[in-house]
């Protein structure tokens, strides 16, 4: 085991777990020693990262033992230990026992990262979403996004997904019910300029001094080291996209971008053929990955398409597509409005997805919501994570939170944040912000030693 | 609040954006949808005539009322069609929607109405209808980059003759046409399955629903106790509007409406 020190003002030592050969007792002893050392140095936090298999084998016993040593917050079943514990979280938006995401990709292919259990990831184009999903979208998986009829947020997800693929030179197949699908490429965002990144870091550094630290979890995420520290846009696994700057045309004239309209065809046979020929070019051979491909299908059951009332045909299409993508180095993202499908069809579609997300609109100028949630004025919508793809493993991913707010920073950059309750009246209050849904109420943390 | 809707239609859509679309939805419990439709039509006509709107012309697709009705309506509201009618055109899908009359006597329609209307004799062919609407609209605005608005009398009538997907297709194509500034239509929600109402709400950027003033009175047996409540329902109603804003948020507004004057209180 090695204790890595991150380049930051307050040292946050991290212990990275090895694969399961290391006995749990050793982990606990080492952790205790590490904590004792850091208590002497008055360092506020320590973080422990363990491989998932360890957690799955003996989660209760391990957490029990560790909780007696550490005064930090365990999510899920464990209780809040003290107010200080609010500062001590590993990755704010994942389980405390989070896998080591800092492993440098051993893959030679740009835009593809190796993950646990023999999976390979491509980025969704949104750094926060990649973190939430444990690295990105796994190659060979089917991602489905449930639209909200009242908000176009699924388009934000699609745009970032498509742009990320084009920036990495990954072939793209885009299907849409509009008359001119190719026109949509003109709305894809461009990676943010380097100048912006540097000035943003400087700004955030300056702002830190002005912040009142009462929602520690929000800020701990920013203290995490940026492992992908090199600045070349093309080499970044996940770029930051400026939604106000269109993607340069050379990305989608030079690359293999195929756009398919689905409004005028009588059924899904043509689309199925396009997908089959696309995926045939990205067959997975012996675990190697020549080039990853991306398929983006927007509003599959849009009402103007003739196939929109053929429930079984659409389901059969999704099933065959899922089968084809499983044996390929590609990711398929399908968006659909569940309000236009029957309840049973919606359930079936949800079951087909490996990763299932949904977007929701929020009411405008809602005073009650503004009182309940902090940062309401910057929010444009909500994102729910219903299911996360878990390939080659039986271990589920338990998320700390499943509802996130979609915000546009400076009206340009898409960020996802945990929901935080707005500050309550200072005299009553706990300084720890709880995460929860819009209608959820906060529970005061109990002190547990 | 109805004025907010009219202003949104007046301002139209930005370059590259789909045109704002309004669904006016009512039911037999509160049958004021057509009054709202007439109000919006009149207001938009005033804006067009005053040159305050993005659109320079208006095409009315009349399914449930004859063109003469609209001419009279606009006259009653003080809009003089006789002097200049190069800003409005009425597509008559009411007189002979299925082409049953092989001959049409011009006397059936008033002379005034006939000069600014044209017949559509096959409402089942929505591709043809789409072309007719675009053709008439371009005829109003000329060759330039101007735009026109579209008012559809009743999509409930439209879907009687065509499938849901083709109705959704024509509405979506009209919204995405470069020269369409705004579009609005009327829907009687209790005539359809929920799916069709959901489809129209999905396609529109504003949904204005007219609901009964006394919700509890509707559906109950008529007796002395709830008679007054029922009577109230036929004079007043509630007006709810949901705006889908550009930033992805939804603005919800509500008010009361009065039948005869359509004053939004």
Image (spheres, rainbow, N blue to C red):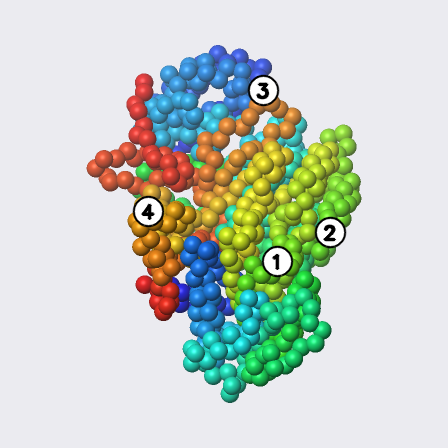
Residue drawn 31% across and 50% down? B224
Q: Which quadrant: the N terminus of chain B?
A: bottom left
User: Which residue is found at the position 72% from the left and 46% from the top?
Assistant: A268
The quadrant of the image that shows the C terminus of chain B is: bottom left
> What residue does disc 4 label?
A368
Q: Are marks 4 and 2 in contact (CB under 8 Å)?
A: no
Q: The numbered mark 4 sits on a residue in which chain? A: A
Res B181 visible: no
Q: CA distance from mark 1 to mark 4?
A: 43 Å
Q: Measure the C-alpha gap from mark 3 to mark 4.
A: 48 Å
Residue B143's spot in the image, x, y percent? 63, 79
Splitting the image into 4 quarters, where does residue A139 fall?
top right
The alpha-carbon separation of the residues under discs 4 and 2 comes to 47 Å
Q: Earlier in the sequence, mark 3 or mark 4?
A: 3
Q: Mark 1 falls on what kind of element?
A: helix
How far apart marks 3 and 2 lie (CA) works out to: 52 Å
Residue shown at the point (63%, 78%) measured from the top left: B139
Count of numbered circles in the view? 4
Out of A354 and A27, give the one closest to the viewer: A354
Image coords of residue A99 (percent x, y): 54, 27
Residue identifier under label 1: B160
Q: Residue at x 65, y 58 (%)?
A: B162
- Relative to A89, say whether A403 is above or below: below
Q: Which mark is residue A266?
A: 2
Earlier residue among tags 3 and 2 = 3
Q: In this picture, is A369 found above or below B253?
A: above
Placement of B101 over or under A219, stated as above or below: below
Mark 1, mark 3: which one is toward the viewer? 1
Q: Which residue is mark 3?
A: A19
Q: Secondary structure at mark 4?
A: helix
Viewer-nearest of discs 3 and 2: 2
């Amino acid at each position: 085991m090695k204790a890595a020190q991150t380049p930051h003002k307050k040292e946050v030592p991290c212990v990275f777990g090895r694969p399961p050969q290391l006995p749990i007792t050793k982990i606990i002893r080492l952790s205790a020693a590490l904590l004792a050392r850091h208590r002497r140095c008055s360092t506020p936090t320590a973080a422990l990262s363990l491989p998932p298999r360890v957690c799955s084998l003996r989660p209760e016993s391990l957490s029990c033992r560790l909780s007696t040593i550490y005064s930090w917050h365990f999510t899920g079943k464990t209780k809040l230990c003290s107010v200080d514990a609010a500062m001590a979280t590993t990755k704010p938006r994942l389980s405390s026992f989070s896998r080591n995401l800092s492993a440098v990709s051993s893959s030679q292919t740009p835009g593809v990262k190796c993950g646990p259990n023999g999976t390979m990831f491509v980025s969704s184009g949104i750094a926060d979403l990649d973190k939430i999903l444990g690295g990105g979208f796994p190659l060979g998986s089917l991602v489905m996004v449930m639209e909200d009829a009242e908000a176009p947020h699924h388009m934000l997800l699609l745009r970032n997904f498509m742009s990320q693929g084009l920036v990495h030179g990954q072939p793209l197949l885009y299907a849409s019910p509009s008359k001119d699908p190719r026109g949509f490429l003109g709305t894809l965002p461009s990676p943010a300029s380097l100048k912006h990144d540097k000035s943003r870091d400087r700004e955030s550094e300056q702002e830190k001094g002005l912040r009142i630290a009462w929602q520690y979890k929000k800020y701990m995420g920013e203290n995490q080291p940026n492992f992908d520290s090199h600045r070349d846009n093309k080499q970044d696994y996940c770029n930051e996209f400026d939604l106000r700057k269109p993607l340069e045309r050379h990305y989608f004239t030079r690359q293999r971008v195929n756009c398919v309209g689905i409004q005028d065809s009588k059924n899904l046979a043509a689309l199925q053929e396009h997908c089959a020929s696309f995926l045939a070019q990205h067959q997975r051979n012996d675990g190697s990955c020549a080039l990853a491909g991306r398929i983006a299908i927007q509003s599959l059951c849009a009402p103007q398409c003739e196939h929109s009332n053929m429930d079984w045909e659409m389901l059969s299409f999704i099933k065959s597509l899922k089968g084809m993508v499983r044996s390929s180095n590609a990711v398929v993202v399908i968006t659909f409005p569940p309000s236009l499908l029957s309840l049973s069809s919606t359930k079936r579609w949800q079951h087909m997805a490996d990763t299932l997300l949904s977007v929701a609109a929020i009411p405008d100028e809602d005073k009650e919501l503004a009182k309940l949630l902090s940062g309401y004025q910057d929010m444009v919508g909500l994102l729910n994570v219903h299911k996360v793809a878990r390939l080659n493993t039986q271990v589920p991913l338990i998320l700390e939170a499943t509802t996130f707010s979609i915000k546009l920073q400076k009206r340009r950059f898409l960020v996802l944040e945990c929901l935080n309750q707005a500050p309550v009246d200072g005299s009553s209050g706990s300084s720890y912000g709880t995460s929860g849904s819009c209608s959820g109420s906060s529970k005061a943390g109990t002190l547990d030693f | 609040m109805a004025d907010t809707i009219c202003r949104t239609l007046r301002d139209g859509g930005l370059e590259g954006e789909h045109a704002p679309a309004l669904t006016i939805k009512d039911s037999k419990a509160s049958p004021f949808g057509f009054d709202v439709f007439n109000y919006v039509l009149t207001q938009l006509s005033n804006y067009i005539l005053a040159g305050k709107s993005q659109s320079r012309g208006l095409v009315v697709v009349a399914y449930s009322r004859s063109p003469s009705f609209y001419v009279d309506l606009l006259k009653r509201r003080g809009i003089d069609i006789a002097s200049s009618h190069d800003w409005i055109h009425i597509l008559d899908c009411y007189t002979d929607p299925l082409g049953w009359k092989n001959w049409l006597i011009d006397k059936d329609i008033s002379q005034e109405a006939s000069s600014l209307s044209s017949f559509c004799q096959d409402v089942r062919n929505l591709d043809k209808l789409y072309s007719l609407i675009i053709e008439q609209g371009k005829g109003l605005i000329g060759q330039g980059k101007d735009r026109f608005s579209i008012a559809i009398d009743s999509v409930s009538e439209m879907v009687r003759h065509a499938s849901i997907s083709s109705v959704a297709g024509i509405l979506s194509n009209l919204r995405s046409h470069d020269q369409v500034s705004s579009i609005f239509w009327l829907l009687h929600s209790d005539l359809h399955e929920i799916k069709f109402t959901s489809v129209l709400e999905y396609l529109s950027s504003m949904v204005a629903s007219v609901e009964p003033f006394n919700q509890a009175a509707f559906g109950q047996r008529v007796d002395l106790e709830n008679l007054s409540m029922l009577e109230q329902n036929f004079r007043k109603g509630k007006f709810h509007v949901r705006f889908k804003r550009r930033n992805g948020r939804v603005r919800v507004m509500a008010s009361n409406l009065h039948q005869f004057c359509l004053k939004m209180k």
